[in-house]
Image: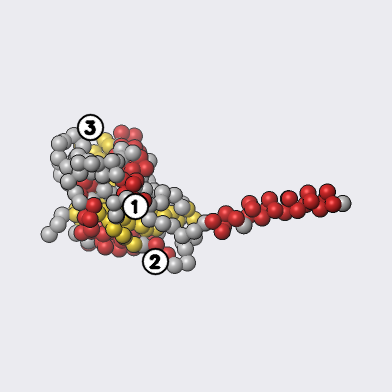
Amino acid sequence: MKKLWGFLSLVLLAVLMLTVLPSLLHGAPQPGGTGAETTTTPPANDDAAFYHVPIEEGDAVYLRIHASSLPEDASISLSDLRYVHVLHVDAEGKTHEGELIVNLAIADDIVEIFRELYKQAYPIEKMRLVDDYDADDERSMSDNNTSAFNYRLISGTNRLSRHAQGLAVDVNPLYNPYVKNDTVLPADAAVYADRTQDFSYKIIEGDLCWTLFTEHGFTWGGSWNTLKDYQHFEYEAP
């Protein structure tokens, strides 16, 4: 009988560890996380999940971007950048944590834009720092990852992108590719270059994403003449 009670006690302990312990260890999201948290319902106080904070040398965010999206020879100052945390909803209605790095000059605007997109359930599939893709823009785009800061050149040129200043955001890039003549980026997005088709995550002039960004002073790459960059919203300082 003692052996039976001992066995049952071990089973009960194992069940408690599997069910209770994870919930005790699960805390609130911290700056510098992976943006991978997913839930089917928003947190009770979801407005508190929308914020931006400075990035300090040596902190968790800095360690993620240093020598990656922020190379040693970058001309932008760390004090000009802000880490942004938001929530977003994908096309299946699931809520995710999202993160971006943007210029201080647009940090408030970005928080407001993505708060409204979330409230109106505008679908955004992923939103992680490009450093999760080794700062490889092609990999990030192919994974339909919405991103902002990346100290890099404009594709096919020797000029710095607006992303290098944290003044541009690419939204749902796989479904809203860069198109110039026969070049489509990301390379696996050619089918989405045909804007007459209807598909999830598509940005069009007049939709909520376009409206919010343009109201906040951003230019949409989908309206350019010499090329189309349907994912791209960039801010021109007044």
Label 3 with label 2: CB-CB less than 8 Å? no
Q: Which residue is mark 2?
A: 47
Asked whether the viewer can see residue 198, the reply is no
Check the image and name the residue furthest to the right. Answer: 1
Classify mark 2: helix, strand or loop.
helix
Whichever of labels 2 and 1 marks the residue nearer the N terminus, that label is 2
Viewer-proximal residue among 192 and 60: 60
Viewer-proximal residue among 221 and 236: 236
Task: Tell me where residue 137 appears, x and y as whole percent.
Answer: 29, 39
Whichever of labels 3 and 1 marks the residue nearer the N terminus, that label is 1
Viewer-proximal residue among 8 and 94: 8
C-alpha distance separating marks 3 and 1: 43 Å
Whichever of labels 3 and 2 marks the residue nearer the N terminus, that label is 2
Q: Which residue is mark 3?
A: 182
Task: Tell me where residue 129 appears, x and y as whole percent.
Answer: 34, 47
Viewer-proximal residue among 207 and 2: 2
Question: Callout 2, which amino acid?
Answer: Asp
Q: Which residue is mark 1?
A: 59
- Up/down of 230 relative to 89, above or below: above
Check the image and name the residue furthest to the top. Answer: 182
Quadrant for the C terminus in the image: bottom left
C-alpha distance separating marks 2 and 1: 24 Å
Question: Callout 3, which amino acid?
Answer: Asp
Q: Residue at x 26, y 44 (%)?
A: 70
Asked whether the viewer can see residue 70, the reply is yes
Label 3 with label 1: CB-CB less than 8 Å? no
Task: Tell me where residue 12 appears, x and y as whole percent.
Answer: 72, 54
